[in-house]
Image: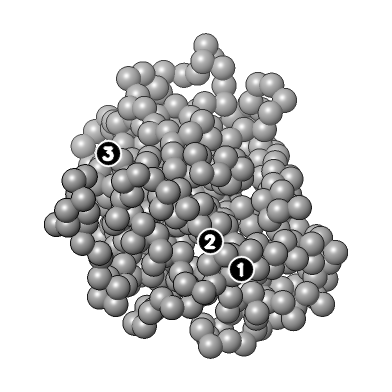
Amino acid sequence: MSVIDILQPWTTAGVDSYRAGIAKLVEASGVAPPPPGSEPPALDPALFAYFARAAEPEEATLGQLTASWAPARDRPASVPAVAGRDGFAHLPGLGYARVRRERDGETGPGRALLAGLEPEDRLSRAVQAVTRDLPSAVACIERAAGHGSTSVRATWREHGADLHAAWETIERLDPQLSSLLGTALEQVVLFREEDCNSFADAAYFGAAFCNMALGSGAVFLVEDLAHQGGHNVLMAAAANPAQWFTTDPGRVPVDGASGHGRDLYVLWHGTVTEALMADVLHRWLEEATDEEPADGETVHELRGRYAFVLTRFSTDLARLRPYGALMTPLGNELLDAVAEAWATHVRVDGEWVAGVDLTGQGYNFSYETYCRRHPLPRATTAAGRTS
């Protein structure tokens, strides 16, 4: 079985358990009735955070987060809602509403009208691109970056088209991967902050935070969606870590040249997501190389990113393999599938990847640094001339 074949049922089960748990918490609150039908509700990351970060300042009301649960005919005209700094609140599944207050200077939640909503920007039926400065999402970024200057809306306006192109590329190259990511993801949040990584947040499950300070364009975003989406997949699949490990992987420190005080759980996350990243980049590189005429810049960047990911994949897999003794039969089945995927990449591409100069690369791949080591070949025109 492939890595995705193994992960898909466990990811689905983990997400369903999260949804069922959240539904019970909402029902117990008395704010919203159980959603109609037998399907658990969509697990919006802000709804997850509402309960996971109970001690945090209020970033949304339960009423706004569950407004879509009731049938349309039973919904009120407005709900109490917390606005972002742009004056809009997100009503998951419905859209964005401007929040109004009865009096100037009033604090606390305002009222969001359910009529005339700004629609969500959907990458797929399951996944949306966040287009507004949602308080809960911005709070995640501010904690990761250590300060609060980001504008999600401005970043989406600049890079939203590339995000759609990246998601469509994943759907075309690997429908199984897009289905797996869509099982765990509800949101993609684009932001721009220096000295901060892209990330996924366990307290804001279901969101991939992609930092556009680290790259731009569809190639970067395909890699980052597989990476951060992959972390959400693994958070769901390992909702019960005992299914994969015979001991608590968060309490097993691992050594390595990269340092950072990583534990077994973090190393496992990193290695499995590298398998997903390497595979989708390899698929695109093969397709782009075969196109006539080939897109030189796309192929050039894909080669660099794929070589970087495969090199790190090799290092991390070698470090992870000895810990198979601490994994269950299911954990070792996944480890074997990851190792088989790696071996295939190395057999096909190992020779040329070994010749790629990755000097100067840090934790995140820098295309600018790569171009200094490997200048972009001069483009060939349709007439066969160079330019």
Quadrant in which residue 279 is drawn: bottom right
Instruction: Provide residue 382's location: percent of width, then percent of height.
Output: 21, 45
Residues at discs 3 and 2 in contact (Cβ within 8 Å):
no
The residue wearing badge 2 is 278
Task: Tell me which numbered mark, 2 or 1, is placed earlier along the sequence.
Answer: 2
Marks 3 and 2, how far apart at CA = 40 Å
Marks 2 and 1, how far apart at CA = 13 Å
The answer to which of 119 and 367 lies nearer the viewer is: 367
Q: Is residue 224 left or right of residue 40?
A: left
Instruction: Provide residue 229's location: percent of width, then percent of height.
Output: 53, 53
Residue 321 vertical placement versus 33 (above, below)? below
The residue wearing badge 3 is 87
Report the residue at 69% width, 68% height from top: 339
The answer to which of 19 and 294 lies nearer the viewer is: 294
Crowding around mark 1 (Cα neighbors within 10 Å: few <14, some 14 to 19, many 20+) is few
Q: Is residue 251 left or right of residue 134?
A: right
The single residue placed furthest to the top in the displayed view is 73
Marks 3 and 1, how far apart at CA = 54 Å
Report the residue at 41% width, 18% height from top: 77
Report the residue at 74% width, 81% height from top: 322
The residue wearing badge 1 is 347
Instruction: Provide residue 317's location: percent of width, then percent of height.
Output: 64, 74
The answer to which of 105 and 221 lies nearer the viewer is: 221
Kind of residue indicated by mark 1: Arg
Kind of residue indicated by mark 2: Ala
Crowding around mark 2 (Cα neighbors within 10 Å: few <14, some 14 to 19, many 20+) is many
Residues at discs 2 and 1 in contact (Cβ within 8 Å):
no
Where disc 1 sits, the SS reads helix
